[in-house]
Amino acid sequence: MPINKLQLITPGTTLTSAGAQSGVSVSNITGDFTVKIYVSALLANMRVAVEETVNSFSTVGQLWVQNLQGPVPIEGVLLSFAGRRESAGTTVVGEANSQLRVNVQELNSYVPSVTLSAWVEY
């Protein structure tokens, strides 16, 4: 079975401050899924969360939070979270109007910069 890939962030996005990115619809995901974040450049210390909602982020749930200490190696770092839609009550992925977004909650350094890509495989 082929893997579908849904971008959460434009590949190679560079952020220079903490903040939430735009949400992406995940209402069509009905089974297992994996959220992946590839950090290709990081000099700072970072805390990144994958957040979910069914109401345009008026109410936000945290699906996954990860701390990462920079600098990252030249080949980058791949972070991964596996989820299952069938696990009732653990995620809103697959529900009507559900969205995921990446939120860089902290970016601490004298050079606050991170370059990353994020996607969902299902």
Image: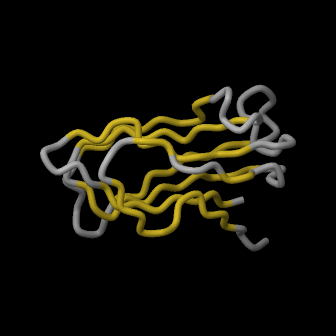
Q: Quadrant of the N terminus?
A: bottom right
For the point 17% across and 43% down, the residue is 109
**Relative to residue 81, is residue 57 drawn left or right?**
right
Q: Residue furthest bottom?
A: 2
Q: Position of residue 87 (x, y in %)?
A: 77, 33
Near-viewer residue (92 or 108): 108
Q: Residue furthest left?
A: 110
**Hey, which quadrant is residue 46 in on the image?**
top left
Residue 73, placed above or below residue 71: below
For the point 31% across and 43% down, the residue is 68
**Relative to residue 44, is residue 99 drawn left or right?**
right
**Relative to residue 12, is residue 59 drawn left or right?**
right
Q: Position of residue 116 (x, y in %)?
A: 40, 60
Residue 100, placed above or below residue 113: above
For the point 53% across and 60% down, the residue is 9
**Relative to residue 54, is residue 12 drawn left or right?**
left
